């Protein structure tokens, strides 16, 4: 992601319920913990930014839902009365903190798995196109009938697609939008990378052959592009032999912008 991108983070809140009624969450537990520390409802409420009335309303609600007192008053003396947690109230605070820590760890673990979930969603996309690239739209040149859409893919590579004006609008294509670029392997032409040649095809990607699957008529050639992406091309076996295509060979893969199909992630 670029420096201007803001990644999404997973967060979650923990709440307790009793008999289907909302008992409380972080703020109410914080009130109980503050009472244990301050020994005073008013001071505890002030410490957590809660009004005195709201604090008592919360305490009354928690006492009722718990079926027993969580907070109790102390008898007045020379220094005046005060408030403290009952043993049940203190236990509730301790248990909530322990559960809260486990919940925090769970959310962190789930957040780490979020990227894998998105990856699995991408992998599960079904299409007949052999080549699938996830890219971000960097430019859209609007035309009368067709639009030219430029994408940035892994390895600082660029792809160009020609789509109809209607398709561009229906997909909501604009800079920053993520899309899939689909290219059939039969649409890819391979050229020797060490032989300069001028071609009209807008997409020209340089890569290294990593795998060749020979056949009686055609051969499938898989290239590794900068950034680790792979691109497959189906060429005649005669062309494969003429270009001496084998693992380690540097070649140029070219295909027309009209051969690129764009699709939005699910």
Image (cartoon, rainbow, N blue to C red):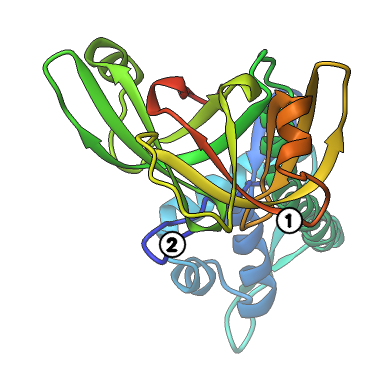
| 1 on left or right of 125 | left
Residue 141, x across and y down, in percent: 19, 33
Q: Which residue is mark 1?
A: 108
Q: Residues within 10 Å of mark 2 (few under 14, many from 20)?
A: few
The quarter of the displayed image where residue 84 is located: bottom right
The quarter of the displayed image where residue 169 is located: top left
Residue at coordinates 87% horizontally, 31% vertically from top-left? 213
Query: Total number of numbered labels?
Result: 2
Q: Which residue is mark 2?
A: 2
Which of the pair 253/226 is nearer the observer? 253
Residue 47, x across and y down, in percent: 49, 74
- Secondary structure of the residue carrying numbered label 1: helix
Residue at coordinates 87% horizontally, 28% vertically from top-left? 214
* Residue 148 visible, this angle: yes
Q: Nearer the viewer, mark 1 or mark 2?
A: 2
Q: Which mark is residue 157?
A: none
* Residue 83 visible, this angle: no
Residue at coordinates 67% horizontally, 43% vertically from top-left? 62
**Above or below, 150 relative to 209:** above
Query: Mark 1 or mark 2, which has the lower sequence index?
Result: 2
Which of the pair 101/147 is nearer the observer? 147
């Amino acid at each position: 992601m670029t420096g201007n991108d803001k990644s999404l983070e997973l967060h979650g809140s923990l709440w307790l319920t009793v008999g289907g009624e909302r008992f409380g969450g972080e703020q109410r537990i914080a009130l109980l913990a503050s009472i244990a520390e301050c020994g005073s409802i008013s001071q505890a409420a002030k410490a957590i930014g809660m009004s005195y009335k709201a604090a008592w309303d919360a305490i009354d609600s928690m006492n009722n839902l718990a079926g027993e007192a969580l907070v109790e008053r102390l008898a007045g003396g020379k220094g005046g009365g005060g408030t403290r947690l009952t043993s049940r109230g203190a236990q509730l605070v301790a248990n909530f903190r322990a559960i809260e820590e486990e919940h925090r760890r769970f959310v962190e673990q789930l957040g780490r798995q979020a990227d894998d979930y998105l990856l699995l969603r991408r992998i599960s996309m079904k299409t007949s196109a052999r080549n699938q690239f996830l890219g971000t739209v960097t430019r859209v040149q609007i035309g009368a009938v067709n639009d030219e859409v430029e994408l940035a893919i892994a390895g600082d590579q660029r792809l160009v697609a020609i789509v109809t004006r209607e398709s561009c609008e229906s997909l909501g294509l604009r800079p920053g939008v993520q899309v899939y670029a689909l290219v059939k392997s039969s649409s890819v032409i391979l050229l020797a990378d060490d032989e300069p040649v001028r071609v009209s095809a807008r997409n020209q990607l340089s890569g290294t052959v990593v795998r060749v699957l020979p056949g009686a008529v055609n051969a499938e050639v898989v290239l590794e592009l900068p950034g680790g992406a792979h691109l497959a091309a189906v060429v005649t076996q005669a062309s494969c032999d003429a270009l001496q295509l084998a693992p380690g060979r540097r070649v140029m893969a070219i295909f027309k912008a009209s051969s690129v199909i764009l699709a939005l992630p699910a």
